Image: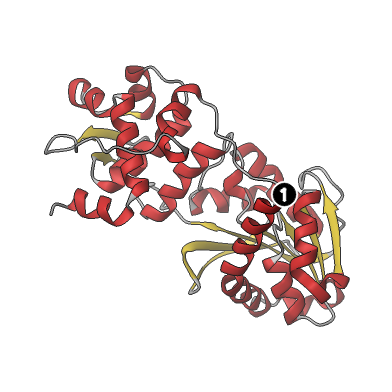
């Protein structure tokens, strides 16, 4: 079995859907006939305008070996793979099966359910992420969070979801308080998930870049949030987090990981393609980009960490200067 088919078999339906979309959009033919091309060139050949969505597809196809990515220059170029393109899989015309349609129309599919389906989704995510949340919170303590005095007992949890990270923080800090920011419907789920710990929580509904987040927090956390948004909104969110922490306080980003050249890992690239399908401008951002947003917000002492409980994730932590 060749490298491409081995990788595709391991990824199952998601890999099938990406290859099917490549065929439907004419990607393989465009590269075979037109030669190597950057994302914009490939987009022009196949007649689509959604270059950020197409880039996510091309990255996945290259990681699977269905095409080749040449990443030595400033802008990656994509090349038809040898032997010729794989056979076109048959996939259901739903969800990922509509990937080619999403790229052509440059419009995402409806993403988040409501009501009981939303509750099940967020509680599942909170439960599945509980171990990573505990590990990350323990790491923030090891990063001298608790040396900040009274302010250290306050966590600002942006895009809190059902509250897995706030729950871990409050459980580890009996005198701590957490401010959770999300939509009203999701915050109601978080109150349920936190249980008795909810008495030490503050709830803020609305856009995290616009609402009053308070100030003097020991740490601000953006966990699994930035991948939902455009680079411009991500920069605003990181800046808002930086303003909300006390001098000497921490800002931590936890998200899926992709290499700076976007050659892998496949898990992060597949998730980036998922964001291209279900969000307006979401993406999985490289560590270099995360560091740039933290630096742009005036933060220092930037450090990267990995979580044993979430090997496909990256944690980037920075500190607000103690003075100035």
Residue 45 x %, y %: 32, 18
Q: Quadrant of residue 99?
A: top left
The image quadrant where one finds the C terminus is: bottom right
Q: What crowding class fits label 1: few (fewer than 14 Cα within 10 Å), some (14-19), or many (20 or more)?
A: few
Whether residue 247 is visible, yes or no, is: no
The answer to whether residue 222 is above or below residue 102 is below
The image quadrant where one finds the N terminus is: bottom left
Residue at 48% across, 50% down: 286
Is 132 on the left or on the right of 58, as rendered? right
Is 18 on the left or on the right of 165, as rendered? left
Residue at 72% across, 49% down: 115
Which type of secondary structure does the marked residue at label 1 adopt?
helix
Q: Quadrant of residue 32?
A: top left
Residue at 38% across, 17% down: 47
Residue where numbered disc 1 is placed: 115
Whether residue 212 is visible, yes or no, is: yes
Residue at 35% across, 43% down: 60
Residue 224 x %, y %: 60, 56
Is 197 on the left or on the right of 320, as rendered? right
């Amino acid at each position: 079995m060749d490298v491409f088919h081995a990788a595709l078999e391991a990824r199952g339906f998601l890999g099938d859907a990406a290859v099917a979309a490549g065929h439907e959009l004419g990607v393989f033919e465009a590269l075979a006939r037109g030669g190597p091309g950057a994302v914009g060139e490939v987009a022009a050949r196949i007649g689509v305008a959604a270059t950020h969505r197409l880039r996510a597809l091309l990255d996945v196809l290259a990681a699977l070996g269905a095409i080749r990515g040449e990443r030595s220059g400033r802008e990656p170029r994509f090349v038809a793979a040898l032997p010729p393109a794989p056979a076109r899989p048959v996939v259901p015309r739903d969800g990922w099966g509509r990937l080619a349609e999403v790229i052509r129309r440059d419009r995402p599919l409806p993403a988040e359910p409501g009501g009981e389906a939303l509750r099940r989704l967020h509680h599942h995510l909170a439960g599945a992420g509980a171990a990573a949340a505990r590990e990350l919170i323990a790491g923030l303590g090891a990063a001298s969070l608790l040396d900040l005095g009274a302010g250290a007992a306050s966590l600002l949890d942006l895009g809190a979801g059902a509250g897995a990270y706030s729950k871990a923080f409050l459980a580890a800090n009996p005198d701590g308080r957490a401010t959770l920011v999300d939509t009203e419907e999701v915050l109601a789920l978080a109150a349920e998930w936190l249980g008795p710990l909810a008495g030490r929580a503050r709830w803020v509904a609305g856009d995290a870049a616009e609402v009053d987040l308070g100030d003097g927090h020991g740490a601000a956390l953006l966990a699994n949030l930035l991948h939902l948004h455009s680079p411009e909104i991500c920069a605003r969110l990181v800046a808002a987090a930086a303003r909300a922490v006390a001098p000497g306080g921490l800002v931590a980003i936890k998200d899926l990981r992709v290499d700076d050249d976007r050659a892998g890992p496949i898990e992060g690239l597949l998730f980036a393609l998922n964001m291209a399908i279900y969000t307006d401008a979401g993406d999985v951002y490289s560590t270099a980009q995360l560091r740039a947003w933290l630096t742009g917000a005036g933060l220092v002492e930037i450090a990267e960490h990995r979580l044993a409980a979430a090997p496909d994730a990256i944690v980037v932590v920075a500190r607000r200067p103690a003075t100035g």
